[in-house]
């Protein structure tokens, strides 16, 4: 919930969640009445558009995947100084898909809720981006297989060495 503007008798807020592609403007009256005023579609951003926002004064991140509603674009510029891990962590992944980093840290429910305040749009997955994501996933899987093979070989060598030294 983000405060948008205020008139003498009403306060307007914008509510957005990472699981929906729409923002809802809410009007709060002094008598505690809540009225949903308008609904607007979130803008769709391309990788090129997001990649231009990589500085302390203009920092955007793409966070989300197919399992949690799809990738969304967040303008976290105003949050950089408040981030518990420091601004540098976010600036390292600014202007790009930061979902893997976000998920690997294991952010709390509160952190995910805080993130929704900075939602500005959805991330457009064009064919080139989808192909790159697929290639990255395959590369990561292949690296995982190679790591497993190295571990198996290492364990076999240690077992052979132990067996050899006991026989001698």
Image (tube, helix red, strand yellow):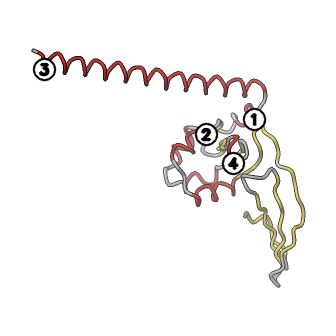
- Say which label, 3 or 1, has the lower sequence index: 1
- Residue marked by disc 3: 166
Badge nearest the viewer, 3 or 1: 3
Furthest residue toward right: 38
Quick check: marks 4 and 2 in contact, CB under 8 Å? no
Which percent across, then down, holds residue 70?
Answer: 72, 42
Badge nearest the viewer, 3 or 4: 3
- Residue marked by disc 1: 49
- Say which label, 3 or 2, has the lower sequence index: 2
- Whether residue 60 is visible here, answered yes or no, is no
How crowded pointer 2 is (Cα within 10 Å; few <14, some 14-19, many 20+) is rated as some
**Which disc number belongs to residue 98?**
2
- Whether residue 136 is visible here, answered yes or no, is yes
Furthest residue toward bottom: 31
Furthest residue toward left: 168
What residue is rendered at 84% in x and 71% in y? 27
Q: Nearer the viewer, residue 7 or 123?
A: 123
Say which quarter of the image contains residue 9: bottom right
């Amino acid at each position: 919930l983000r405060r948008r503007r205020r008139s003498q008798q009403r306060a307007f807020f914008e509510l957005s969640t990472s699981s929906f592609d729409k923002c809802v403007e809410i009007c709060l009256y002094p008598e505690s009445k809540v009225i949903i005023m308008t609904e607007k579609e979130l803008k769709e951003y391309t990788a090129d558009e997001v990649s231009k926002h990589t500085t302390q004064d203009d920092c955007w991140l793409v966070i989300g995947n197919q399992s949690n509603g799809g990738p969304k674009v967040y303008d976290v510029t105003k949050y950089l100084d408040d981030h518990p891990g420091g601004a540098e962590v976010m600036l390292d992944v600014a202007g790009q898909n930061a979902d893997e980093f976000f998920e690997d840290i294991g952010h709390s429910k509160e952190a995910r809720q805080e993130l929704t305040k900075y939602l500005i749009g959805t991330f457009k997955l064009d064919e080139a981006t989808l192909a790159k994501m697929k290639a990255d996933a395959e590369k990561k899987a292949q690296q995982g297989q190679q790591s497993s093979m190295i571990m198996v070989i290492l364990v076999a060598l240690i077992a052979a060495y132990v067996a050899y030294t006991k026989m001698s």
